[in-house]
Image (tube, grey):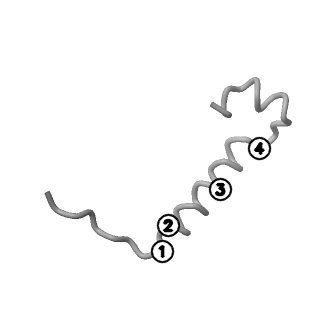
Amino acid sequence: MSEPLQREWRFYVSDMIGFAEKVTAYTEGHDQERFVASGLNL
């Protein structure tokens, strides 16, 4: 079995930024009560 390709650290940082932007978009307008009730926290 071959070893997985190693990615440069900057690609992981780019992924994290993209995921954070998605979280911000998905939870926009939610207060804590609405966020918990939505099930997005699971």
Residue bearing mark 2: 12
Callout 4 environment at 10 Å: few (<14), some (14 to 19), or many (20+)?
few
Which of the numbered marks, if any, corresponds to residue 28? 4
**Residue at 67% from the left image edge and 26% from the top image edge:** 39
**Residue at 14% from the left image edge and 57% from the top image edge:** 1
Say which amino acid is labelled 3: Glu
**Residue at 28% from the left image edge and 68% from the top image edge:** 5
The alpha-carbon separation of the residues under discs 4 and 3 comes to 11 Å
Say which amino acid is labelled 1: Trp
Residue bearing mark 1: 9
Callout 3 environment at 10 Å: few (<14), some (14 to 19), or many (20+)?
few
| Disc 3 element | helix
Disc 1 or disc 3, which is closer to the eye?
A: 1
Residue 19 image offset from top left, x and y in percent: 58, 54
The alpha-carbon separation of the residues under discs 4 and 1 comes to 29 Å
| Disc 4 element | loop
Query: Pointer 4 and pointer 1: residues touching (CB < 8 Å)?
Result: no
Drawn side of residue 3 relative to residue 6, left or right: left
Query: Pointer 1 and pointer 3: residues touching (CB < 8 Å)?
Result: no
Disc 4 or disc 2, which is closer to the eye?
A: 2
Q: Quadrant of residue 33?
A: top right
Residue bearing mark 3: 21
- The one nearer the camera, 30 or 42, is 42
Is residue 6 placed above or below 29 in the rendered structure? below
